[in-house]
Image (cartoon, rainbow, N blue to C red):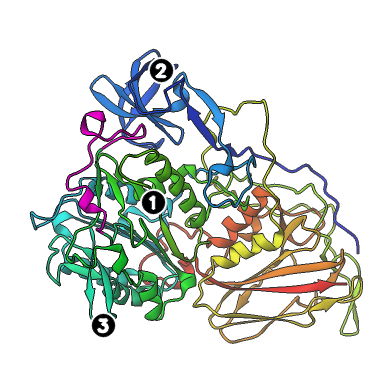
Amino acid sequence: MKRWTPRHPVAWLPMTLLITLLGAPGAGAQGSDELKSLRNTELRVDKLPGAAVLAPLPAGTPLRLLSLEGGWAWVAAGQHKGWVRASSLPLQTELAQAARLPNGRQAADNHAQALTVRGQPGRSGRHALIISISRFADPKTSPLPGAAEDRKSAAQIARAMQVPDDNITYLQDEQATGDNIRRAMAALNTRVQDGDRVFIHYSGHGTRFPDPETGGCAEALSTYDGGTWKGMVLHKEMAQLLQPIVLKTDKLFVMYDACHSGGLLSQMPTPRQRGAAHGHVNDNDEGALRGRFTETSESCARPSNVRPRSLLDEATAQGAFPQDVVFLSAARPDEVSLEDQQKGGLATQFVRDCMLRDAVDLDASGAISLDEIQQCAQTKINQRLKNDSLFTPHHLLLSGNRKFVPAWFSQALPTQQVPGAPSTGVLNAVAQTPTSVSGLSVPVSVPSGAPLPSVPSVPPAISPPSAPPPPTAVQPPAPPRMTGAQALAQLFEQRDGKRRVQARLGSGSLRIGQDVLGLSVLSDRSGYVYVALAGSDNQSLTLLFPNELDSNNRIEKDQQLLLPRPHWPVKAAGPAGTDTLLVMVADAPRQWKALPKDPGSPFARSLNDLQGRARLGLLLGNAMTPQPGTCRPNTGPACSDAYGAVLVTVEEK
C-alpha cells in the first residue's frame, strides 16, 4: 500500500526546562543576602506573572533575598515583601535532576521537562466550592491564619482547571458553619449538569472521634461551629452529600488540607516560631508552622488506635466510580499536616505551584497528571521541612484516578502543521486506488495536489519560557519515549466511567496487505465517535475517524455503528505487530480538523512526540469551544467535555 510521504519538516517549539535556581554560597538558605536587581522588574504579591503588582523596581534597586522557590525569589524591598522573577537577580542557575523526585519513575540523570500553563478561558461546565476556616466560634479551637491564604491558592487551582469565577463558591470563617456547608453542597448539586467537572477544596481543622458502628475512629472536618454534631462533617456524610454530584460529573476532584491525627500535637502546644532564639533552626523556614487538627477524643488522636475509612472508601461505598473521583489529602492518617501562617497550608501552596508551573512531565506524555503534581508538591514539602528540628515531612495521599489530567498543559500549538516523519504505516486507508466493495469497483481518491482545508487556530496552552537558559555543559539524556499505546491509554484514563462504550473487532488478527479492518461501536448514550490509532511502528498517532472522506461521526443511543464505512476501507499495511485503537464517544464535538494532516491523506494525525501527544490530548479531551453565551445552565451535552471510551488491540501479521 502506498505510503504518504512527508513534504515539510515538523514545526518544533521549545519546552520550558525545569530549573533550580541557586544563589551564591549561602544564598540557597533563608537569610538576609543583599543584592541589586539586574533590570527593571516588578514586585508582586504572588509567584504568578498575573499577580497584583506591589511596586515597580528599577534596575539597581537594593533587595534582601528571603527565599527562592519555583523560579521566583521572595525579597524585601524597603518596607515591602513580595515576589520577583529570579532571573532578574544576580543568581547562578543549575539544571535540576529528575532523580530528586521521590518515587524513581525516572532514572538518575534523566532529563525532565516542566510544563507551565497560562490562563485559559473558563468553561461553563466547571465548578468549584472553596471552604477555608481560619478562625472558629469556640475560643479553645486554635486559629489557622494560613487558611485565609489557602482561599486564594485554591481559587488559582480552580482557574487553572478552567472554572469561571462566576462558578466558584466561597465559604470562609463564620460563613462555613456545618449547616451552610451542607446547603452549599445542595446548591452545587443543583447547578451541576451531566458531564460537568467539580473541584472542592477544604482548608481547616480535621478531627477524629470513636465510631461505635465500626469499632474504630470516624474522621471528620471541623466547621466554624465545630464541637457539636452539627459542627462536624463526617467523611460518611460528605460522601452522601457528594453522591448525587458524582453521579453526574465526569470528574470530581476533592482536596483536604487538614489532618486527622493529633498524636504529635502535644509536642507543639503553640505555633512553631522561627529562629535559633526559639530553639528551632531550619534554613528553609519562612513562617510559623501550625498543625491542622482539633482534638475531640484522646484515644482517636493517637495513631496506634486508627482504623479509618477514607473519603474515597465512603464515596465508592455510595456507588461512585473510582475512575471518576480524585481525593487528595494533605497527610497520612497518622501524620500532622502543617500550614505556614504567612503562605497557607504547605499542601495547598505547593499543589498550586506545581499545577500552575513547577510540575514535571515525567513520562513525556505532553500533559501533567495529578500523580505528577503530587510528586512535585511532595518534593517541595520535603525541602521545606528539610533538617527541621521538630517535624518530618507529612505525605500527600492521592487516591482514586491518579492519572487524571486537571488541565491539558501543552506547548503552544501552531495553527497548521504538516508532519515530516514517516507515515503511520500500520493501517492505511485504501483511499488512493480502486477497491472492490460488495462486488463493485469503487475508486476513491484524494488528489495529491488538492489544497488542505483551512485549519482553525488553536490557542497556545502554555506561556513561553521565562527562566534563564540552562548551562550548555552537559545535557542529561532524554526520558524514554512513550509508546503510542501509552499515549492513548492516558486519554482513556480521562474517560467518564459512567459512560459505557463497546467496540468489537471483525477480526483481532489481520494479514498484512490482505485483510481490512472491521469495527462495530455501541454506546449507552448518543454522542460523537472518534477513533484514534497508535500503530505498531510507533511513529505517529492517527485519527481514523472522522476524516476528510467521512465527517458524519454522530452515533445514537444503543444503535450500532459500523466502521470503516464502505467508501474508505482500511487495510493492514504493516509492519507486523500490535495496533491500539482508542474508541471515544463524546457528548459534544471535538475540533478534530485542527489536527495536522498529510497532503494526499484523508486522515488527521499527530507525531508520537511530546508536542503531538499534547495536541491530540488537548483537542480530543475538550469539546469544541461553543459560541459565547451559548453554554448556560441546563443547556445539555452540547457544552460537555465528558466522554466514554474503550481500548482495543488488533494484531498485524
Location of residue 409 with respect to 12 vertically, above or below: below
Q: Report which quarter residue 430 is drawn in.
A: bottom right
| Residue 110 in the image: above or below residue 303 | above
Q: Is residue 284 magenta?
A: yes
Residue receiving disc 1: 157
Left or right of 635? Residue 133 is left
For numbered disc 1, what is the local secondary structure? helix
Q: Is residue 267 above or below residue 328?
A: above
Disc number placed over residue 501 in the picture, else none? none
**Considering the image in quadrants, where does the C terminus appear?**
bottom right
Q: Is residue 145 magenta?
A: no
Closest to the observer, 620 or 98: 98
Q: Label 2 sits on what residue type?
A: Ser
Q: Secondary structure at mark 2?
A: loop
Q: Is residue 339 left or right of residue 606?
A: left
- Residue 225 position, x and y percent, is 12, 63
Query: Does 607 appear above or below 26?
Result: below
Q: Residue at x 53, y 62 (%)?
A: 623
The earlier-in-sequence mark between 1 and 2 is 2
Name the one closer to the observer, 453 or 319.
319
Q: CA distance from mark 3 to mark 2?
A: 62 Å
Can you identify the residue that label 3 sits on?
Answer: 213
In front of the other: label 3 or label 1? 3
Give x and y (percent) for residue 64.
33, 20
> In the rendered structure, which segment of residues is drawn in magenta?
262-287
Residue type at tag 3: Glu
Give the mark nearer the N terminus: 3 vs 2: 2
* The quarter of the displayed image where residue 538 is located: bottom right
- Image coordinates of residue 305 in percent, x first then y, are 29, 69
In the rendered image, which residue does mark 2 sit on? 37
Residue at image point 85% right, 70% down? 572
